[in-house]
Amino acid sequence: MIKVRKTTSNTGKYSWTRQSHHLKTALRPRPVRTVMTRSQCTSAAGLFNGLPAEVFHMILDQMSVVDISVFSMVSKELTNYIVDYISSQAWRNKTIIQSFHNPTLLEQRSSLEHYRHLGLLFKRCTLLLPTKDRLKFIFSKFSQIPCFTLEQCLAPDCAGFSRYGVFLQTLIAGWDELECHRVFSFLCDQTNLLLKTEALLTTKPGLKQYQELQLRLFCRKVLLDPCQCQPDGQFWLVQLLKPWPLVSQAHLLFILFGPLLHEGVLGWQDLVERGLPHSALWDLAKCILMLSGTLQVKGWSTDSVLSILEELIVIPQPWYMENVARLLVLCGSSLCYTFLASKALNGRLDEISRIIIHIILVCEKDGYHMSWAVKLVQQICKVFSTAPERFTFIQHLENMFSEVTREFYESSVAGNNFEDRETFQTFCILLDSSARFHTKLLHMFLK
């Protein structure tokens, strides 16, 4: 038997109650639903807010420099905590100040990597600061360390400057040119670099040997040598040279790149008195080539590079001619030709003839192909527009061969000491080089 549900008089009442319930629900304001990020729910700094500073520092003590640098980018609050941590004297003494004297090869590699990591740490934890404030904070941590400061460390083999350079180049990697200008200005203010440079440039070369060596090491190890690409090296070299007149620029280039003797002093007089091997002149050649690649820099041109080269080869006095020739050979065909062609156009035939004779001598001594010297002479001949001018140039060149040969012969028979024997050997090499040169020259015309 099926039971049928009876309709009661309460049906309407129940229906009215449900409708009023829906009406009340519609009128009641609903809570606004929001999407919360993980950092809003539990910020990274919030995890450490309850910790005493000493405990937080203990945690950081167990982390590597690289880990701390990554950790500093999690949030602004954590960056502030880490800045406070690395500002402590205890951390500075433990992490920044190290032994830079007489390190082993393994210690050198480890130390270089350590200062590269320090550069990343300071780069990341000061990321939100303006450039001026970043530099002020960073240099305050490094400026009082003697091994990072000009003329403060007396140890002969101190590695402080090289570590400072690795740190600085890591720090500013990717910065634009305007920021790098600010870095240079700030560095000059902190170290009195320009004043100390001026003091050397206004003093007789070689008179302040320790200061010359310190300026060389600081500029080379901190600014120039750590550069990973040529444009960076060009930028810093131009900044170092730009404040000074032409003669002082050549003087400064010699301090920075001139030949260094075993005693740790610059070989000012050696370039004047005797021939030096190509290894002693290679750094100077590289810096001149670097300058010749900066022609896109405002205020620099081929003429300015040639003018610096002209001044360089007479500091402190006119160089021994073989050294001039060897430097030009190391600078390559293009710069060597441009240098000699400019003299040819000015009618300085005796001067370029003497240089070419010594270039031929250097080719024979150092094992360069004599055809290179022949092609150089051929190119210079094309500078002259008429046949009589070209004949005059060749005549000067042949007369200079005879004169230089006679000079070496007379010098070699003047005595019997070691220098005279060396001169006689050079005399013999000159005769051989003359024969090779003229053989190549005649072969070129007889083809």
Image: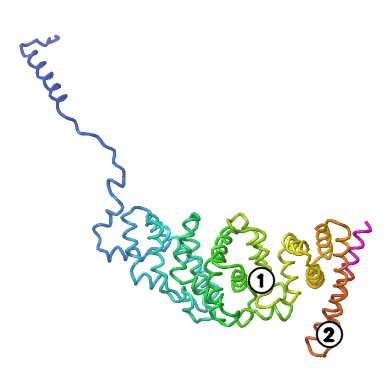
Residue at position x 62%, y 73% in the image: 254
| Scheme of colours in the image | rainbow
What kind of residue is marked 2?
A: Ser
Q: Mark 2: few, some, or many residues within 10 Å (few <14, many ≥20)? A: many
What kind of residue is marked 1?
A: Leu
Q: Report helix, strand or loop for mark 2.
A: helix
Q: Which residue is mark 1?
A: 312
Please determine whether, in this image, residue 430 is positioned above or below residue 126. below
Indicate the position of residue 204 as horizontal and vertical percent values: 59, 80
Is 417 left, or right, of 99 in this rendering?
right
Is 169 left, or right, of 8 in this rendering?
right
Residue at position x 9%, y 10% in the image: 7
Q: Nearer the viewer, residue 171 or 345?
A: 345
Quadrant placement of the C terminus: bottom right
Q: Nearer the viewer, residue 392 or 234?
A: 392
Is 214 colored magenta in this rendering? Answer: no
Is 67 left, or right, of 212 in this rendering?
left
Q: Which residues are magenta?
A: 436-447
Q: Main secondary structure of the magenta part?
A: helix
Q: Which residue is mark 2?
A: 412
Question: Which of marks 2 and 1 precedes in the sequence?
Answer: 1
